[in-house]
């Protein structure tokens, strides 16, 4: 009986791999992608024309800003860590608190955030209309420049920001030499310790919410989903972040409280899983996490 | 305006055709719409079905607690559910379905939101539970292996774990028992592992609590049911729609079918009409009638072959032309005006045209021209014409025959009457005067009879030509009878003008006319009546001129007379006489009387003069001096003469037996009789029949008759004398006898005219003449006879002067046959 239960609850015996590799290509509208890319890198979308999407989402460096909190126009500082834009298309919701259903909705957020880009769409539309963008929009969209089309183009571009061919994905695809033994061991520990319960799927996370500090109070200033639903049971519930390219997205956690991965792994084991973990285990898990760095998105490579 | 006309011009068939096409298009569009509805319905149906499956998946998902689940899959399903909902909530669906649909949809949305929340909790709880429970095993094994715990503690640990496991095998979890165990463990040892164990058990309990909450919420979940409602609703709606759409489709189809049937019927009718039209066309093209159709501006738009044949123009020459191309200019202009008027009034016109062919010849056409209406507006004119040239020419010929004399080509009586009838009203208006000259050739009958009709006809032609010479062009010359001509001429000065013309004509005839071998002396008698002096009635005017002509004849012929009113009575009488005379012989109205002739010296009866008498039933007794000239003129004298001759001969034979001294019978012979070709053979026939000797027959011939045609008379008389007949000259002394001729003539007897005897012996002139005649005849050895002796003194005078024979009332009045026999017996 006992043995049976062990088998039943053992992650190591999962028949199917809980992590799926990122597809090598993704379908997208090239015209929109081009336009979206241009908009993504253009500070025209901010009130004082100083900040673009790319200001906080450096695609070549992990898709985030490397800062604890996002900064905005006039040197303002935000109160939450910028999540990476890479592979965000595979997130089931956007933002830490999941308030955006998809990329297009997400794109509206920072633009209109007074701290971030501090602009409303009305003047942006005017600005774009009086620029070269007008013709480009008219070429693609029958209704020309408007809010919907701006975010659509940006979302279409962001859709292409996937990082396939990470060593681990290659391993999953059958290349047993793609990762080191440590990394293989780390992956096993990652599953056996229960990390996999939350961090799984194509994005190794990013497919549900969970409580920040399950076994112990993690002392978070932000309330997570509660901010959206005002539901008491949603307090401290955040979107489980993706671990893709995790090595490059420090600092970590929504408040950027750790700069090193091993600290986060240690923190996660105690606060989330409620278990004690050895340094060796931590090292191996970090080693595994380092195998998750994918290639720079195709749309960014050809300039 | 133009559009109006255009629509008017669309006929029923085209209209139906357009309607039919319109209905077909509607039908097609509607079919497309219905098809889209069906597609939509199946899309909605599929979506709802899919949503139901997904919902089932959700429910299954929510039952999989404490199992590792890759949430990507359920996220994808949720995304699909979102998409499905979005589709159901699309704008089209709002158009298609009424409120109830949206209410149901909203309900689903609400329920789904709750479900999503549950699933999100489930995901979180499940993850937490999963690694917690996983760790519980791990920690349980670790504690038991590493720590030397007493048996009870181990049992409690295992017991707690198994108790928790019950939850996963759907058994009731004994919470109180677990709590009791935990209390024990807490009191037992503050080992870190045990603490973690307790921590995770607590955690597990909380999770179980949470799952129960989710399950409770799940119990109220009605998404499937609402989806089912929605499905049912869609089916009902769809079926209702389908029924309505089917009805509409059937109706549209029926409409289209009806129109199609109407079209077929109309097409059949039009085929029939076309056949009829073809028949008409054949009739028009092959008929005898010319058919011309023109447009409203009188430009020819259609002609049949008859027109081409009749006019000689080709169709290219005629089409587009005005029909006046055929005008000859000989049709009366007023006819065209009438035509124009009739057509302008929208009426039919019928009449005749005298048109010209291309080669210039004239032809007559009887035409019916009528406007063709279309929608109460004249659009064309139709002319149907028949060539009546033959008919007209024939008619003209007949008319000519009716109005013209075939022999002389002159107008006839009818023409004159018509002419006068037409002209007199004009003359009346103009106060102009007319003279009507009635001309009769004197003794034409004799010429005709003696020289033959050929000569007579030639003579008439010659006379006509000669009379014409005396006339102006404006004067009308007509032949109204055998030898009768009438001239109608304007005569401003009635007395002068007409008389002048009469004289001119008479003078022209002084020259004899040469016909073949004959040289003929012709005289004319002319009667003149004047309009308006004598009468204003044309019939009477002609009659009066006729009467005046007779007057001229009576006064010696070769002259002219103006009409005087009293003459008309005689003329009337004469006409009656002519009529009665025709039947006199048949009715035995003609009879004979005989007057004895006696020797003056001894009153011995030696001869008889046969005298003809006419007791007319209608006219009473008519004296011979009245009816004989008429009989001569009409030619009746020939028959009467022969009757007299035969009667006299027969009677004489009777008388001769009674009286031994009776030597001969005197019979009057008219000049008309004498000049008959058959005269001699006729009387010789009678002589033989009656068996009488010609020497007893004395032929009395009037002096003037012989003298008119001396050569011919002489020959005849000589011939008669040779045959044995005796010749007596009647009325001797009244004519212009030339004594030279008298001597040459073969004469046996001279009869002194009664007019000389009447005044004997008192009148010296008459006495001298009488005695001279007696002396003359004695010297020429003629026997002379005095007639009309009524007095003793007369008889004495004649006897004294040696006149041989007497005759008269003194001795004896003329007596009927029987009376005479008595008289002869008595003597």
Image (cartoon, coloured by chain):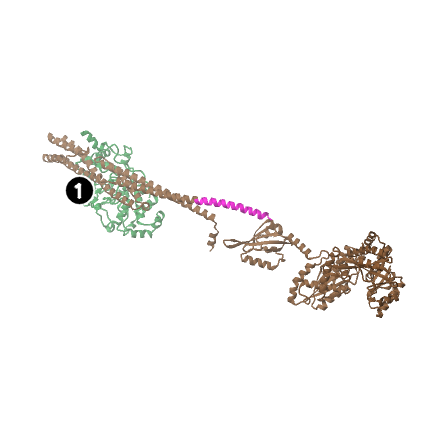
Q: Is residue B730 visible?
A: yes
**Prevailing secondary structure of the magenta residues:** helix
Q: Hey, which residue is sitting farthest left in the picture?
A: B187
Is residue B462 located in the magenta-colored stretch of the structure? no
Instruction: Say above or below: B531 vs A95.
Output: below
* Residue sitting nearer the eye, A13 or A260: A13
Name the residue carrying label 1: A218
Instruction: Say which quarter of the image contains residue A249.
Output: top left
Residue B36 higher or lower than B357, as above or below: above
Q: Position of residue B365 (x, y in %)?
A: 61, 53
Whole-percent x, y for residue B521 in the image: 79, 61
Question: Which residues make up the magenta segment?
Answer: B258-287
SS under mark 1:
loop
- Residues B625 and A89: in front is B625
Q: Find the residue positioned furthest to the front.
A: B826
Q: Quadrant of residue A290?
A: top left
In the rendered image, the quadrant that contains the C terminus of chain B is bottom right
Question: How many numbered discs?
Answer: 1
Q: Name the foreground residue: A242 vs B625.
A: B625
Q: Is there any visible trace of residue A292 in the rendered image? A: no
For the residue pair B826 and B200, the one nearer the viewer reads as: B826
Residue B263 falls within the magenta-colored stretch: yes
Q: Residues within 10 Å of mark 1 (few under 14, many from 20)?
A: some
Subunit under mark 1: A
Residue B388 location, x and y as percent?
Answer: 63, 52
Chain ID, brown in image = B
Provide residue B311's location: percent of width, then percent of height: 62, 52
In the rendered view, does A18 fall on the left or right side of B393?
left
Q: Which chain is green?
A: A
């Amino acid at each position: 009986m006992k043995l049976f239960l062990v088998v039943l609850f053992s992650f190591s015996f999962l028949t199917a791999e809980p992590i799926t590799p990122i597809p090598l290509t993704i379908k997208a509208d090239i015209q929109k992608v081009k336009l979206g890319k241009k908009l993504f890198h253009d500070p025209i979308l901010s009130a004082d024309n100083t900040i673009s999407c790319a200001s906080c989402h450096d695609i070549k460096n992990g898709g985030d800003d490397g800062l604890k909190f996002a900064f905005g126009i006039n040197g303002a500082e935000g109160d939450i860590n910028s999540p990476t834009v890479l592979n965000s298309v595979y997130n089931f919701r956007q933002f830490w608190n999941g308030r955006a259903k998809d990329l297009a909705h997400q794109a509206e957020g920072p633009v209109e955030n007074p701290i971030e880009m501090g602009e409303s769409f009305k003047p942006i539309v005017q600005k774009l209309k009086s620029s070269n963008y007008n013709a480009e929009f008219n070429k693609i969209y029958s209704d020309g420049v408007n809010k919907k089309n701006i975010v659509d183009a940006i979302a279409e571009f962001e859709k292409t920001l996937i990082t396939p061919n990470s060593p681990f994905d290659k391993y999953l695809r059958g290349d047993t030499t793609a990762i080191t033994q440590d990394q293989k061991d780390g992956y096993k520990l990652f599953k056996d310790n229960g990390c996999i319960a939350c961090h799984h799927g194509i994005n190794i996370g990013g497919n549900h919410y969970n409580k920040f500090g399950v076994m112990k109070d993690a002392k978070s200033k932000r309330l997570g989903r509660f901010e959206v639903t005002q539901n008491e049971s949603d307090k401290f519930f955040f979107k489980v972040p993706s671990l893709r390219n995790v090595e490059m997205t420090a600092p970590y956690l929504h408040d950027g409280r750790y700069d090193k991965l091993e600290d986060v792994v240690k923190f996660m084991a105690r606060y989330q899983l409620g278990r004690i973990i050895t340094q060796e285990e931590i090292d191996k898990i970090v080693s595994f996490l380092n195998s998750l760095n994918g290639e720079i998105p195709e749309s960014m490579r050809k300039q | 305006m133009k559009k109006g006309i255009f629509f008017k011009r669309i006929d029923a068939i085209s209209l139906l055709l357009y309607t039919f096409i319109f209905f077909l298009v509607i039908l097609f569009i509607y079919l497309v719409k219905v098809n889209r509805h069906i597609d939509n319905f199946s899309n909605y149906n599929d979506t709802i079905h899919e949503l139901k499956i997904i919902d089932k998946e959700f429910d299954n998902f929510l039952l999989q607690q404490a199992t590792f689940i890759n949430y990507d899959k359920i996220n994808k399903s949720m995304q699909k559910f979102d998409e499905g909902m979005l589709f159901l909530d699309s704008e089209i669906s709002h158009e298609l379905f009424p409120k109830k649909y949206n209410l149901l949809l909203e309900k689903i949305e609400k329920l789904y939101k709750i479900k999503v929340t549950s699933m999100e909790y489930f995901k979180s709880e499940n993850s937490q539970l999963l690694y917690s429970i996983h760790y519980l095993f791990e920690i349980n094994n670790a504690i038991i292996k590493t720590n030397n715990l007493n048996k009870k503690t181990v049992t409690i640990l295992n017991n707690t774990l198994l108790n928790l496991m019950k939850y996963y095998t759907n058994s009731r979890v004994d919470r109180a028992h677990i709590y009791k165990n935990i209390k024990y463990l807490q009191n037992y040892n503050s080992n870190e592992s045990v603490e973690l164990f307790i921590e995770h058990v607590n955690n597990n309990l909380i999770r179980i609590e949470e799952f129960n909450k989710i399950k409770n919420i799940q119990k109220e979940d009605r998404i499937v049911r609402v989806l089912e409602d929605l499905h049912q609703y869609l089916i009902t709606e769809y079926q209702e729609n389908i029924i309505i759409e089917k009805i509409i489709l059937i109706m549209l189809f029926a409409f289209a079918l009806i129109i199609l049937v109407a079209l077929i019927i109309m097409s059949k009718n039009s085929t029939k009409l076309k056949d009829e039209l073809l028949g008409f066309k054949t009739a028009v093209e092959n008929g005898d009638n010319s058919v011309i159709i023109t447009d409203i501006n009188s430009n020819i738009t259609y002609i049949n072959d008859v027109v081409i044949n009749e006019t000689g123009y080709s169709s290219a020459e005629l089409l587009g032309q005005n029909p006046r191309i055929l005008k000859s200019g000989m049709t009366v202009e007023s006819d065209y005006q009438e035509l124009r008027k009739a057509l302008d009034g929208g009426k039919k016109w019928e009449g005749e045209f005298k048109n010209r062919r291309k080669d210039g010849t004239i032809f007559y056409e009887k035409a019916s021209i009528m406007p063709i209406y279309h929608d109460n507006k004249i659009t064309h004119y139709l002319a149907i014409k028949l060539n009546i040239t033959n008919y007209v020419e024939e008619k003209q010929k007949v008319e000519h025959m009716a109005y013209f004399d075939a022999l002389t080509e002159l107008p006839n009586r009818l023409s004159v009457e018509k002419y006068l009838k037409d002209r007199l009203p004009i003359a009346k208006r103009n106060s102009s005067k007319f003279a009507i000259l009635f001309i009769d050739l004197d003794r034409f009958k004799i010429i005709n009879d003696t020289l033959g009709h050929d000569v007579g006809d030639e003579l008439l032609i010659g006379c006509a030509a000669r009379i014409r010479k005396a006339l102006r062009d404006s004067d009308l010359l007509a032949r109204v009878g055998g030898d009768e001509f009438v001239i109608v001429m304007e005569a401003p000065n009635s007395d002068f003008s007409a008389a002048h013309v009469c004289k001119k004509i008479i003078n022209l005839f002084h020259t004899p006319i040469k016909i073949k071998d004959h040289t003929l002396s012709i005289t004319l008698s002319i009667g003149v009546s004047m309009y308006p002096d004598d009468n204003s009635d044309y019939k009477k005017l002609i009659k009066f001129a006729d009467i005046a002509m007779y007057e001229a004849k009576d006064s010696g012929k070769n002259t002219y007379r103006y009409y005087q009113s009293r003459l008309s009575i005689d003329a009337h009488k004469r006409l009656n006489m002519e009529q009665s005379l025709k039947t006199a012989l048949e009715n035995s109205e003609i009879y004979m009387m005989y007057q004895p002739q006696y020797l003056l010296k001894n009153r011995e009866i030696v001869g008889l003069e046969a005298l003809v008498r006419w007791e007319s039933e209608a006219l009473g007794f008519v004296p011979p001096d009245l009816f004989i000239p008429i009989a001569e003129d009409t030619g009746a004298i020939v028959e009467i003469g022969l009757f007299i001759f035969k009667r006299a001969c027969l009677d004489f034979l009777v008388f001769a037996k009674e009286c031994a001294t009776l030597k001969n019978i005197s019979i009057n012979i008219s000049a008309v009789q004498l000049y008959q070709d058959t005269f001699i053979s006729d009387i010789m026939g009678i002589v033989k029949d009656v068996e009488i000797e010609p020497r007893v027959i004395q032929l009395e011939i009037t002096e003037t008759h012989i003298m008119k045609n001396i050569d011919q008379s002489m020959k005849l008389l000589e011939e008669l004398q040779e045959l044995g007949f005796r010749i007596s000259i009647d009325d001797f002394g009244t004519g212009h006898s030339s004594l030279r001729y008298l001597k040459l003539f073969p004469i046996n007897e001279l009869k002194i005219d009664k007019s000389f005897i009447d005044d004997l012996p008192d009148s010296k002139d008459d006495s001298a003449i009488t005695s001279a005649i007696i002396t003359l005849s004695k010297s020429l050895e003629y026997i002379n006879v005095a007639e009309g002796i009524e007095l003793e003194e007369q008889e004495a005078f004649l006897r004294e002067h040696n006149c041989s024979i007497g005759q008269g009332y003194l001795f004896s009045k003329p007596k009927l046959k029987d009376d005479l026999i008595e008289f002869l017996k008595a003597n």
